[in-house]
Image (spheres, grey):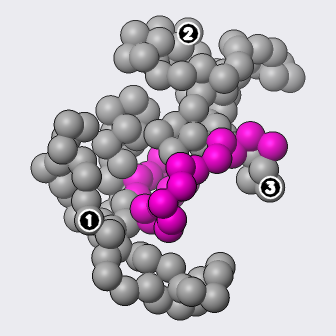
Amino acid sequence: MLWYKKHLNAPVRQGFPATDLNESDCRVARGADRTWPALNREGMFRSPRAGVEFGDVVLTWYMNQGDKPLAPSRGQMQDHIGLSVTDLDAWVGKLRGEGVTFLEGPYRFGETRAVMIEGPSREAIELVEVK
């Protein structure tokens, strides 16, 4: 959540607790119990959870369910998510200055341009310029 607030100016999802954590102390212990429904038989840990909003797009996530690092989202069933921005050059400058990882671009995307960046859990995020 902190990464999305810092780099993409995303507000915390309504109804989710705000946090005083910062990047140097953002470790939160996983909840003790798994719950269902879940994508696996063992159930899933739903605490802690976080969420941010981008207009009418809401991203909600839970902490890593296992002990292994997450794989990149590129090439997976959900390859990436896309968000629109009004001034791609300004965003590229901001994100490069903050050390965000760029996966691709800027590149032509139909009549406009886009870039692909990597989020904190190795998820690919496409920023598409709209005028």
Residue 65 among those drawn in magenta: yes
Q: Which residues are magenta?
A: 51-75
Q: Residues within 10 Å of mark 2 (few under 14, many from 20)?
A: some
Which residue is labeled 1 in the image? Answer: 29
Eyeballing the image, is 43 above or below 117? below
Q: How would you classify the magenta stretch by its main secondary structure?
A: loop
Q: Earlier in the sequence, mark 1 or mark 3?
A: 1
**In the image, residue 91 lies at what x, y percent?**
49, 17
Spatial distance from mark 1 to mark 3, Cα to Cα?
29 Å
Task: Specify the quadrant that holds the C terminus.
Answer: top right
Q: Amino acid at mark 1?
A: Ala
Which residue corresponds to the image point at 37% horizontal and 66% vertical from the top-left?
Answer: 49
Rendered image quadrant of residue 23: top left
Q: Judge depth for marks 3 and 2 and give the one in front.
A: 3
**In the image, residue 24 lies at what x, y percent?**
20, 37
Eyeballing the image, is 99 above or below 118? above
| In the image: residue 41, left or right of residue 52 | right
Q: Amino acid at mark 2?
A: Asp
| In the image: residue 58, left or right of residue 113 | left
Spatial distance from mark 1 to mark 2, Cα to Cα?
38 Å
Which residue corresponds to the image point at 51% horizontal and 45% vertical from the top-left?
Answer: 121
Which residue is labeled 2 in the image? Answer: 89
Q: Residues within 10 Å of mark 1 (few under 14, many from 20)?
A: few
C-beta proximity under 8 Å, tags 3 and 2:
no
**Is residue 98 at least partly visible in the picture?**
yes
Which residue corresponds to the image point at 47% horizontal and 12% vertical from the top-left?
Answer: 96
Which residue is labeled 3 in the image? Answer: 77
| In the image: residue 127, left or right of residue 108 | left
Q: Residues within 10 Å of mark 3 (few under 14, many from 20)?
A: few
